[in-house]
């Protein structure tokens, strides 16, 4: 289970600044038309070899000056339930407020790691004042200035140390998460799959905490479906519905092998879909794109081929993914969607014999050797697949640091061309021989 870290606290304590610092502010602009970069709410932080998904709860509050305290409380409760760890942010310049106390009371009850971050500690006086926050009783308390970044290294060190990245449960049976924006037809898709014939479904309490994995076994296909539809309809969730559904989606993705991303044929790929797609890539999950409501599209003006090209252009550079056009309403091509998901699962688990890998790839490399760097020739001597739970390859060579990104992409594309890896990200590493 990957780690999901939620940053909570009252408005204006600096949550977004910390969030940007944690995810390194290096996020590529995914879609500069709809202000996506300003309001990115979740991303990946990598530190000391650990990866975690960071979610900024502040990004989910509209008009955040006079946010109801109730909304913040409900957000903290959702985060406590759904995240693996919590960063609780307070502000040294205001001292401990009543709302801080309330949030602290909620957080003290959880068994999950809580990191108390006292922000805006940027001079000696404030350093002294910050000590009052130790009275809140959180063992992991950090003073930092999220603007200048001082102190964030210690916080990250401590997170990386305390959060273990478990390898996903190795099950022979694939785990699929159905993810997509509200009203795209997720629950109808799940119902169409599982059918009225509910006796083929056994609900198995989620391996981690409480998501429900439904086991499907029919027509010779067997898999788990990870349900994100909100198992217990929470009272009071409505004002934080978007936050709640994003938390569920991220968690389902973390627990799955393959993400089935549902997209509405009428709107195409939107910013939120891109965020989820990018995250799935970074977490090395398999992906199948399902374009739903295809029955509503005027076929004369828009063919599936046109739309597939358009979608793949948006997903580039990684667009070696199956795109299936379905209609949940008319139950069209749902079996095909499943076949694609099972195929991607197999591709993600594919292991290639070292001898075969070297035969084919050495031939490719001999024909297109890596460009020399300032007269230094780069010789790739040996290739092996790493024993990870997704496809990753090590190329052993004499000067790994001189290999250019373009050549790395070339090798990845050649691996895709010669071996079947559609729908799954590949990692390529260069190691000193």
Image (cartoon, rainbow, N blue to C red):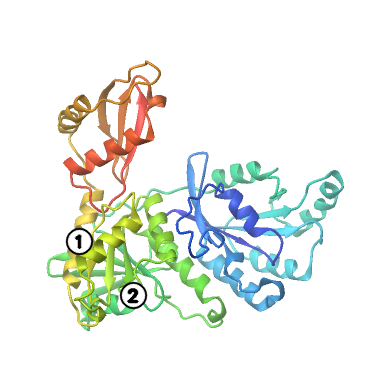
Q: SS at mark 2?
A: helix
Q: Quadrant of residue 395?
A: top left
- What residue do we see at 60% from left, 75% from top? 74
Q: Quadrant of the N terminus?
A: bottom left
Residue furthest to the right: 125
Picture coordinates of residue 31 (x, y %)? 45, 59
| Residues tagged 1 and 2 counted as in contact (Cβ below 8 A) | no
Task: Judge whether 412 appears above or below 193 on screen.
Answer: above
33 or 347: nearer the viewer: 33
Residue furthest to the top: 375
Confirm whether residue 58 shows in the render: yes
| Classed neighbour count for the residue bearing mark 2: other residues with Cα under 10 Å, few (<14), some (14–19), many (≥20) | many
Task: Judge whether 362 appears above or below 319 on screen.
Answer: above
- What residue do we see at 33% from left, 77% from top? 185
Picture coordinates of residue 199 (x, y %)? 22, 79
Specify which label sits upstream in the sequence, 1 or 2. 2
Q: Quadrant of the C terminus?
A: top left
Confirm whether residue 257 shows in the render: no
Q: Residue tagged by mark 1? A: 340
79 or 25: nearer the viewer: 25
Q: Residue tagged by mark 2? A: 186
Task: Locate residue 355 relative to residue 263 in the image: left or right.
Answer: left
Picture coordinates of residue 181 (x, y %)? 40, 72
Residue furthest to the front: 301
Q: Quadrant of residue 95?
A: bottom right
Task: Locate residue 136 relative to residue 126 in the image: left or right.
Answer: left
Mark 1 → mark 2, Cα distance in angstroms: 17 Å
Picture coordinates of residue 239 (x, y %)? 57, 79
């Amino acid at each position: 289970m990957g780690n999901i870290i939620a940053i909570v606290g009252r408005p204006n304590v600096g949550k977004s600044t910390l969030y940007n610092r944690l995810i390194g502010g290096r996020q590529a602009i995914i879609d500069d038309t709809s202000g996506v970069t300003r309001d990115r709410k979740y991303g990946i932080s990598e530190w000391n070899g650990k990866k975690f998904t960071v979610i900024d709860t502040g990004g989910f509050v509209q008009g955040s000056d006079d946010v109801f305290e109730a909304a913040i409380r409900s957000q903290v409760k959702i985060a406590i339930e759904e995240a693996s760890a919590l960063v609780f942010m307070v502000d040294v310049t205001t001292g401990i407020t009543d709302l801080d106390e309330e949030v602290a009371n909620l957080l003290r009850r959880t068994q999950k790691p809580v990191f108390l971050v006292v922000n805006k500690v940027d001079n000696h006086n404030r350093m002294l004042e910050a000590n009052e926050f130790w009275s809140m009783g959180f063992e992991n308390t950090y003073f930092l200035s999220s603007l200048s970044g001082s102190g964030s290294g210690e916080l990250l060190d401590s997170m990386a140390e305390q959060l273990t990245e478990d390898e996903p449960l190795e099950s022979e049976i694939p785990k699929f998460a159905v993810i997509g924006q509200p009203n795209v037809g997720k629950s109808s898709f799940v119902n169409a799959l599982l059918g009225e014939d509910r006796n083929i479904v056994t609900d198995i309490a989620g391996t981690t905490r409480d998501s429900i994995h439904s086991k499907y076994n029919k027509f010779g296909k067997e898999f788990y479906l990870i349900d994100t539809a909100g198992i217990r309809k929470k009272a009071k969730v409505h004002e934080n519905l978007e936050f709640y559904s994003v938390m569920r989606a991220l968690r389902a993705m973390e627990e799955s092998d393959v993400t089935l991303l549902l997209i509405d044929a009428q709107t195409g790929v939107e910013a939120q879909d891109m965020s989820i797609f990018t995250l799935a890539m970074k977490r090395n999950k398999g992906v199948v794109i399902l374009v739903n409501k295809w029955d509503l599209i005027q076929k004369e003006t828009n063919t599936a081929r046109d739309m597939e090209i358009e979608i793949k252009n948006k997903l580039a550079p990684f667009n070696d993914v199956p795109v299936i056009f379905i209609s949940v309403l008319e139950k069209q091509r749902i079996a095909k969607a499943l076949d694609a998901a099972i195929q991607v699962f197999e591709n993600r688990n594919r292991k290639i014999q070292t001898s075969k890998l070297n035969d084919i790839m050495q031939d490719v490399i001999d024909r297109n050797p890596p460009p020399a760097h300032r007269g230094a020739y780069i010789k790739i001597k040996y290739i092996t697949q790493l024993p990870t739970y997704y496809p990753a390859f090590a190329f052993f060579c004499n000067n790994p640091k001189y290999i250019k990104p373009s050549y790395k992409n070339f090798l990845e594309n050649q691996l895709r061309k010669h071996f079947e890896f559609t729908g799954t990200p590949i990692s390529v590493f260069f190691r000193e021989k």
